[in-house]
Image: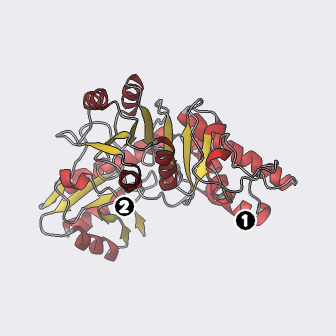
Amino acid sequence: MRYLDHAATSHPKPAPVLAAINEWFEAFGISADRGDSHQAVEVNQRVTAARRGLGELIGVPGERVAFHSGATESLNLALRAVLRPGDTVLTTAFEHSSVVRPLRALTEERGIVTEILPPDPDFGLAPARVVTALERLRPRLFVFTHASNVTGALFDARAFCEAARANETLSLLDVSQTAGLFDIDVGADLVAGSAHKGLHAPPGLGFLTARPGLELAPQKQGGTGSAVALADHPTTWPSAFEAGTPNTPAILGLAAALAWLVAEDRDQLAARALARTQDLEDRLAAIPGVRLVGTPTGPRTPVTSFVHDDLDPAELGAMFAAADIHVRTGFHCAPWIHGHLGTAAAGTVRISPGPAVSADDIAAAAAVVAG
């Protein structure tokens, strides 16, 4: 199979990641802080390394990194911890359902007010428009994605966070599309993301970080492996935002993935994926009936979406499947943006190359569309 859906999940995983996961099952079988054996000490060290590695990427101490089941849980917990009844929230039309749906639920539960920034005419999002909205609204929270998972547009998150801080607004940044590919140390108060995309770690793992000094009430309670018998859930990080048995094999896989990214040079990996994306778009643009959708004119991720005048995205998906090429079709869990793109009826075909995708893979994908 030719795999071209790295915006959803990177595949295949690097060999060191697979080895770390397998080692947990074969040699450890223990969660962090759940014992005093030599194996438990080794697991604790590797989990600490994963926290520290993520913290270095984001610009926070490792103890400010909490692990969850995915970015969805991390975003839900952050939104519920921050937002109070009647608060105003600023967000963007590019958001994933992991933000859209919790905000909808909190509107009903707590009466929050959400303002959604539409895209610019070129489908970017200029910092000046963010500044204007923040100055006008003075919201409690600005929650936004670092990059669109539909168009690949990469936003100026640093400028957005600076504008939020200047207007006494908390910033919650979703780095699910950029972690492992681009710089995510941009000054956000809260950062949420997933491990299984650009970080090349296993699925079923996400993270939330909070800058030092920003204290949030725990949103779920349970076991944390604490050595002290407490009836109340801990209030210090990371235990405050972790409860229950963690996905330790995935965390060990993440620790290995972070080391692999350093060894392979993250910038070079991203450059290869972007080069394949440009090759793909050049080929698609030459095919009659194909229309690239929302193609970024500025900074971008290796993601492209397109439609065809004569073929529904689902029909194209069937054609790719017949050629044993894995792509994505439909709405990509980003419901708000499609009305602006003119794709609200059936969505798009999305192709997102990873660093191991070959020129032959790209040529084969374009050949499917050309017929």
| Residue 55 image offset from top left, x and y in percent | 60, 37
Q: CA distance from mark 2 to mark 1?
A: 34 Å
- What residue do we see at 67% from left, 53% from top? 252
The colour scheme is secondary structure
Per the image, label 1 sits on a secondary structure element best described as: helix
Q: Quadrant of the C terminus?
A: bottom left
For residue 361, which numbered disc appears in the image?
Answer: 2
Would you say 148 lies left or right of 199 here?
A: left
| Residue 347 image offset from top left, x and y in percent | 24, 62
Can residue 77 be seen here?
yes
Q: Quadrant of the N terminus?
A: bottom left
Q: Is residue 154 above or below residue 276?
A: above
Would you say 57 lies left or right of 289 here?
A: right
| Residue 284 image offset from top left, x and y in percent | 21, 56
- What residue do we see at 36% from left, 34% from top? 139
Q: Mark 2: few, some, or many residues within 10 Å (few <14, many ≥20)?
A: some
Residue kind at label 2, given as amino acid type: Asp
Q: Mark 2 or mark 1, which has the lower sequence index? A: 1
Which residue is outermost to the right? 37
Would you say 276 lies left or right of 245 here?
A: left
Per the image, label 2 sits on a secondary structure element best described as: helix
Specify the quadrant of the image occupied by residue 117.
Answer: top left
For residue 25, which numbered disc appears in the image?
Answer: 1
Specify the quadrant of the image occupied by residue 339.
Answer: bottom left
Between 56 and 172, the one nearer to me in the picture: 172
